[in-house]
Amino acid sequence: MTDGFVTVRERMVQEQLQPRGIMDVRVLQAMAEVPRHLFVEDALRAQAYGDHPLPIGGDQTISQPLVVAAMTQALQLTGTEKVLEIGTGSGYQASVLSRLCEKVYTVERINSLLAGARKVFDTLHYYNILSRLDDGTMGWQEYAPYDAIIVTAGGPEIPQPLVDQLADNGRMVIPVGEREVQELHFVKKIDGEVEVEKMESVRFVSLIGEHGWNG
């Protein structure tokens, strides 16, 4: 798709992502392809490729490009995976994932955000994204197990339903900690056992639900 932001996206990749550890060629290509400006309000489009998060309504945000790329890279996608995303938000992260895997299943609890994301998915013809309105901390049992799971909100712990729905040899990236600040956890499931590696400090909106914060 041709738009007026192609050069801006390329600069984002070259100046924000590559110098800061994003080396997966497929992730860089997806970040250069997906039109981030379509996932924010018209008034914010000029800021869409800046090195910072932006508000999207409902007290939610679209994450900084570097965070999206780093979490995506950690999943080590090859193109054949089923990926579960918790927290659709604007739909940007799901769209990046959709360029890198076979199918994305994304769950959002705020109806207005999900409706907006679905419109952009349709506009871009990203038809390998399936979405639903629900409590994301419960996962999406119907299509489990998932090769990879990504959670785009911070909770006090790793929700057990997500661990249960992760395939053997599956990977999960999730922010865990306090409401104000979290650490990214990289989770791998091997022979039914879970290994957790802590990555960097991050700040996400709160993961609300039965296995997250109360509200």
Image (cartoon, helix red, strand yellow):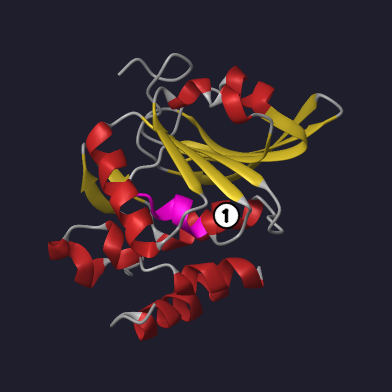
Determine the residue positioned at 56% across, 21% down: 159
Can you tell which quarter of the image residue 2 is in?
bottom left
> What span is colored magenta in the figure?
90-96
Residue 75 lies, with reference to residue 179, above or below; the image says below
Can you tell which quarter of the image residue 8 is in?
bottom left
- Residue 53 on image: x %, y %: 32, 55
Q: Is residue 165 left or right of residue 89?
A: right
Nearer to the camera, 179 or 76: 76
Q: Is residue 164 left or right of residue 3?
A: right
Regarding residue 46, the answer to whether it shows in the image is yes
Magenta region, main secondary structure: helix
Regarding residue 21, the answer to whether it shows in the image is no
Residue 172 lies, with reference to residue 44, above or below; the image says above
Where's the C terminus, which quadrant? Answer: top left
The residue carrying mark 1 is 72
Determine the residue positioned at 37% across, 50% down: 91
Can you tell which quarter of the image residue 100 is in?
bottom right
Where's the N terminus, which quadrant? Answer: bottom left
Q: Is residue 93 magenta?
A: yes
Q: Residue furthest left?
A: 43
Determine the residue positioned at 38% across, 52% down: 63
Q: Is residue 134 left or right of residue 70?
A: left
Residue type at tag 1? Thr
**Which class describes the residues within 10 Å of circle 1: few (<14), some (14-19), or many (20+)?**
many
